[in-house]
Image: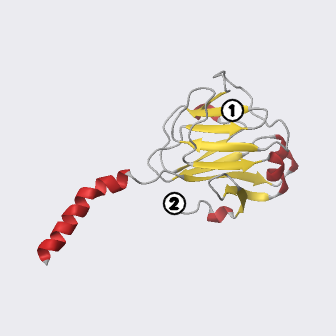
Amino acid sequence: MVVSRLRGLIALALLSPFLVSCQPTGGHVAAVATGHFTAGHKFPVVMVTWCGQDPPRQIDLLGDTQRRHLVATREFEGRSLEVDLSDPGEDWSIVDDDGGPIYRMGPESPEEEYLLGVGTAEAEPGEATEHDIAVLRFTTEALAAEQGLYASVSGEGEAEYADPAEFPPAC
């Protein structure tokens, strides 16, 4: 009986590196909604949390008329970060689909829907990365309508307002 338990523990110990390495990535993303009319005219601050070992490397902001790609210029530590999409700072380089630099970030109109995709890999210019951390669909008009967090509730990026104290949900 002791021998069979010992074998079970040894087998578990040998499999544990495989179990740890197979943990899913995934995560959560939310846009900060200010509930103020000015939010309709600028991109929001987004909160990103990730569950796997790999931090975000690329954030795609894809709309009908513009496609922007924020590429990380450094490795992020921890499990969460905030990014001001209107002014992401030195931690991100911003390029268009042709790989050309972008210096100003702003929505074309408050009604335009954007897909925000966060991934752990960097893609070539013009190609969206796999959004293996999270996806969020939003309009800046919606962010101007209510205060709180506009958080992704599905793998397709459908979102709803969430209590900031309850974000992020568990992995």
Image location (x, y in percent) of residue 30: 66, 53
**Residue nearer the viewer, 171 or 39:** 171
Residue tagged by mark 1?
68
Image quadrant holding the N terminus, namely bottom left
Image location (x, y in percent) of residue 154: 64, 57
The colour scheme used to paint the residues is secondary structure
Asked if residue 38 lies left or right of residue 10, the reply is right
Q: Amino acid at mark 2?
A: Cys
Element marked by disc 1: strand
**Residue nearer the viewer, 62 or 28:** 62
Q: Amino acid at mark 1?
A: Arg
Residue tagged by mark 2?
171
- Residue most toward the bottom? 1
Element marked by disc 2: loop
**Between marks 1 and 2, how big is the CA–CA gap?**
28 Å
Question: Which residue is pictured at 71% across the width and 26% down the height?
Answer: 103
Q: Is residue 94 above or below residue 118?
A: above
Asked if residue 118 lies left or right of residue 16, the reply is right
Question: Which residue is pictured at 59% across the width and 59% down the height?
Answer: 168
